[in-house]
């Protein structure tokens, strides 16, 4: 059970994210997720029945060698009825992943996930991301995505006054090239811990 100890330690370091994943999964009826750059954060599986985790770090690959035990643990602790389905792909998320389209992509501190894996998101699917590496900023600037909500400071989903986000001081414009080269989100007047984007429906 080394993986469980590792997960418990990791969870105490990053904080419990289950409540955020749960809120978003319920609001947007999420059943299938993709989590590129997941490392060993398996908490989405507690609230989402099918999650594909992708990470090319050897520590994550080793962790997921115990995937059957991880599934047993999740099945004992999950918050939904059906049995869990946990898939791990130990590769660079820029590679072809060969997966079904998902209801949500989770992007947390792992680069430009929302750009690299957008093609796996179904129409109207959700990108849940933070702006640590600038992924939320790139989604905001991307015409394929529309900002539909944020996780506010009380850990609730807020869908109101979204125009106050992604605003820089003194009316400055966002420098996309800088975000891409530094892999860092700009410091906005008002920041949210996480942003919720929807993939726009493509016209026929
Ligand atoms: C800082 S950790 C964040 C882990 C997790 N998302 C969290 O928030 O707890 C970044 C993870 O993303 C993974 N990662 C970064 N770029 C990646 C890529 N191109 N392909 C696969 N994994 C990647 C790293 O291996 C690492 O495990």
Image: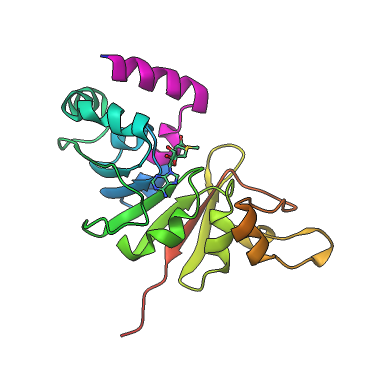
Lateral position of residue 89 relative to residue 179, left or right: left
Residue 76, compared with residue 57, is above or below; it is: above
Residue 66, compared with residue 142, is above or below; it is: above
Q: Could you say where residue 99 lies in the image, as x and y percent from the top left?
A: 22, 56
Residue that appears at 21% across and 58% down: 100
Q: Is residue 126 visible?
A: yes
The C terminus - image quarter: bottom left
Residue that appears at 23% across and 36% down: 80
Residue 34, compared with residue 49, is above or below; it is: below
Q: Quadrant of ligand 1?
A: top left
Lateral position of residue 81 relative to residue 6, left or right: left
The residue furthest right is: 170
Q: Could you say where residue 140 lies in the image, as x and y percent from the top left?
A: 56, 64
Residue that appears at 69% across and 59% down: 164
Residue 197, compared with residue 51, is above or below; it is: below
Residue that appears at 51% across and 43% down: 109
Lateral position of residue 193 relative to residue 45, left or right: right
Residue in the foreground of this view, choosing between 56 and 135: 56
Name the image colouring.
rainbow
The N terminus - image quarter: top left
Q: Quadrant of residue 51?
A: top left
Q: Quadrant of residue 11?
A: top left
Residue in the foreground of this view, choosing between 169 and 138: 138
In reply to whether residue 194 is colored magenta, the answer given is: no
- So how many labels did they put on this image? 0
Q: Is residue 159 visible?
A: no
Q: Main secondary structure of the magenta part?
A: helix
Q: Could you say where residue 35 lies in the image, as x and y percent from the top left?
A: 36, 46
Span highlighted in magenta in the image: 2-22
Q: Could you say where residue 166 lies in the image, as x and y percent from the top left?
A: 66, 59
């Amino acid at each position: 059970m080394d993986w469980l100890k590792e997960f418990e330690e990791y969870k105490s370091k990053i904080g419990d994210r289950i409540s955020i994943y749960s809120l978003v999964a319920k609001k947007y009826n999420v059943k299938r997720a993709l989590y590129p750059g997941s490392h060993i954060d398996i908490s989405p599986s507690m609230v989402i029945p099918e999650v594909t985790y992708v990470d090319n770090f050897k520590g994550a690959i080793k962790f997921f060698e115990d995937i059957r035990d991880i599934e047993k643990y999740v099945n004992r602790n999950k918050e939904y009825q059906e049995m869990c389905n946990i898939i791990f792909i130990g590769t660079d998320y820029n590679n072809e992943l060969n997966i079904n389209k998902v209801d949500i992509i989770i992007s947390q501190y792992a680069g430009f996930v929302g750009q690299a894996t957008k093609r796996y998101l179904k129409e109207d699917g959700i990108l849940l991301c933070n702006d640590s590496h600038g992924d939320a900023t790139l989604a905001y600037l991307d015409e394929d995505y529309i900002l539909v909500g944020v996780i506010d400071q009380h850990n609730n989903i807020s869908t109101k006054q979204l125009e106050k986000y992604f605003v820089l001081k003194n009316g400055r414009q966002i420098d996309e090239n800088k975000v891409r080269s530094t892999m860092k989100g700009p410091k906005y007047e008002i920041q949210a811990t996480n942003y919720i984007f929807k993939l726009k429906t493509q016209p026929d």
